[in-house]
Amino acid sequence: MNVVCYLDDHHESGSRLAALVQTYGSKAQVNICRTRDELTHRLLQPTQDIRAAVLLACDHQHLGLLLSLRDMLSNCRTILVLPDRDPFTVAQGHTLRPRLLTYMDADFVPLIEAVLGRIQAGCCPEVNGGHAGVA
């Protein structure tokens, strides 16, 4: 399963998330992106074979970056970790149409693990015509 993951591994949550995502495939199948340029480069690859995008927005600056890439993420099964539970932040996060939306202050690792497991098992249908199935 090909997974792209955007995170800040200097943040404790980013390190935990990187370790989790790397268990879902070999290095060739998991791309850890730490900058906007790395993520953009991976999303623009001619072979759009990404089964899931795990995105950690540890602050509003990172969330803004992800929102700016919304069009490139439209065909991915997105898992999004938001920096807080503010209604405006949550509304912004929903514009990415994530399969799972969770928060930095939650124990999100088991949730992400469960959703990635369902995606890997093929339980999450493809994104068709801009409408995603429910994870």
Image (spheres, rainbow, N blue to C red):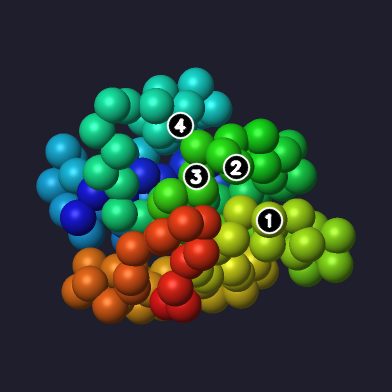
Query: In this picture, is 75 found above or below 82?
Result: above
Amino acid beneath label 4? Leu
Q: Which badge, 4 or 1, is on the more N-terminal residue? A: 4
Q: Nearer the viewer, mark 2 or mark 4?
A: 2
Q: Viewer-proximal residue, 32 or 70?
A: 70
Residue 95 is tagged as 1
Label 1, label 3: how far apart the Cα atoms are: 11 Å
In contact (CB < 8 Å): disc 3 and disc 2: yes
Q: Which badge, 2 or 4, is on the more N-terminal residue? A: 4
Circle 3 sits on which residue?
73
Label 2, label 1: how far apart the Cα atoms are: 8 Å
Q: Residues within 10 Å of mark 4 (few under 14, many from 20)?
A: many
Residue farthest to the front? Answer: 129
Which residue corresponds to the image point at 61% horizontal and 54% vertical from the top-left? 96
Total label count?
Answer: 4
- In the figure, is residue 9 to the left or right of 83? left
Which residue corresponds to the image point at 30% horizontal and 46% vertical from the top-left? 50
Label 2, label 4: how far apart the Cα atoms are: 12 Å
SS for tag 2? helix
Q: Which badge, 1 or 3, is on the more N-terminal residue? A: 3
Amino acid beneath label 1? Thr
